[in-house]
Image: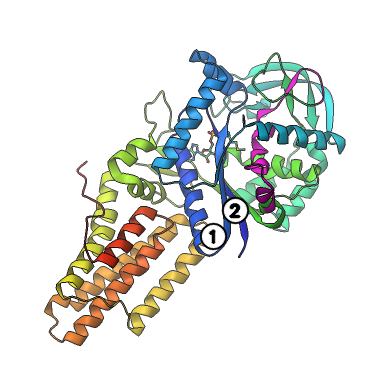
Amino acid sequence: MKKILITTPIYYVNDKPHWGHAYTTVAADVLARFFSLQGNDVFFLTGTDEHGLKVAESAERLNKTPKELCDENSEAYKFTWKNLGIEYNHFIRTTDKIHEERVIEFLKTLKDKGAVYEKEYEGMYCVECEKFLTEKDLIDGKCPDHKTEPKKVSERNYFFKLKNYLKEVEKKILSAELLIQPEAAKKEVLGLLKQELEDFSISRQKEKVRWGIDLPFGKSQTIYVWVDALLNYYTGNGTKEFAEYWEKGEVVHLLGKDILKFHAIFWPAMLLAASKKIPKREFIHGFFTIDGQKMSKTLGNVIDPNEVVGKFGVDGARYLLLSQFPFGQDGDVKKEKFAEKYNADLANGLGNLVARVLALANKHNIKSDKPDKETKKKAEEVRDTYRQWMENFKLFETLEEVWRFIGWCDKYIEENKPWQVTDEDKLEQILSNLLYCVSEISDLIAPLLPQTSKKVKNQLRTGKPEILFPRINK
Ligand code: MSP
């Protein structure tokens, strides 16, 4: 049994959660459930990133105080996660007092260790990214991601001596002490480490960025929002028990590729500078576009996860999130195809198989689920492959494996035609095999589609078939 801490990025509260945020969180939930079902002691942490200019400016536009906006939208995140069947152990808000205290403590440590210095600085700040951009980053003078002009900033700030720790970070990645996955993400990080990375500022002048944690040293400065945000992983719920996941366990971060540099370079460097343990594994997933385009309010193509749950149910939404394209790659989501996919794989595939097997077992009054040798062997093979995919965070492939097994069961029914079998022993064995397979499937889907798994188990116990996934017309 291992202690494992699984985290999602903490989400900005300038807006409500969308399909992209749901993607990371559902994936983390699936992995947390899987590792926990395997007998590990898992802590699943998620939450909201509440300080900084981006949130403050959004609040101002909406005529709200930053705190009001944070309260409102952190609730929207909690509500959405509940709707998607997410079972986290703790939801951290960076405005929590305990977190603010921990951040201050950590910054004092950095200062004491000599990892911080003061310097006059001039740069261009993209509020949407919450980071400084260099001339090289810009396209036509604009941020390539947000198509907005960064703000010129000239002020005296505190800096973190990033450069002093880069060699060590690189060593940890090369030796796999810090696993960056998939391989393409690792390559990207190693490439970044070959470039001249600059020390980064860890504070801003309070008169410019008021909505932040006060820097414990230095006058009238607030702590840079990314430093504050990354430290959420270290604060957790602030208990001794939580600290043990860092000290004795494996820390696993899930994140999108947009924030790779912060997680794979800045974060371990900060931890090394403070003589703390670094995470074990960072898994970077891709980004999706919606019908070929970036999700954006202006384009009006933002998918609200709650709407999808309303239409397709919790597990329908979870399935639609994970079955689009391999986790770790980029892909395009076709909203128009949701109903088709749901009907084919859930209503017809899984739902139909369970209903068919239960109806046959009922008709012939079969309760036994003892498999014959061949069926048992098949199920074991599926379980092995499934476990390997899961352990490598290949959620798309895991689903594929389960659905191949569903297809195998359908074929088994077609080939053995239980409705034509007159030999009673033979019929009993066929149906026992099928009941065994359905029970196996209910275990396999437990982390992925937890509600459905429970329903199937219940139906196997009572023998009463109930529709799992009603068909949906567009
Ligand atoms: N607050 C920072 C993270 C701080 S972590 C210490 C942040 N927040 S965010 O609200 O912008 O959410 C970022 C995360 O949401 C991405 O890293 C990614 O995991 C997820 N996604 C946002 N849009 C997405 C897509 N279009 N596709 C897939 N995932 C997406 O950055």
Which residue occupies 75% across, 20% down?
221
Drawn side of residue 109 relative to residue 450, left or right: right
Q: Nearer the viewer, mark 2 or mark 1?
A: 1
Tag 2–tag 1 contact (CB < 8 Å): yes
Where is residue 81 drawn, in percent x and y? 44, 41
- Residue 299 vertical placement versus 10 (above, below): above
Res. 227 image quadrant: top right
Q: Earlier in the sequence, mark 2 or mark 1?
A: 2
Q: Secondary structure at mark 1?
A: loop
Q: Amino acid at mark 1?
A: Asn
Label 1 near ligand 1 (CB < 8 Å)? no
Q: Secondary structure at mark 2?
A: strand
Taking the magenta stretch, the answer to whether it contains residue 129 is no
- Residue 5 vertical placement versus 411 (above, below): above
Q: Which region is colored magenta?
A: 217-244
The residue carrying mark 1 is: 392
Which residue occupies 22% across, 50% down?
470
Where is residue 384 drawn, in percent x and y? 47, 71
- Given residues 253 and 81, the one toward you in this image is 81
The residue carrying mark 2 is: 181
- Given residues 314 and 266, the one toward you in this image is 314
Label 2 Cα crowd, 10 Å radius (few <14 / some 14-19 / many 20+) = some
Render colour scheme: rainbow
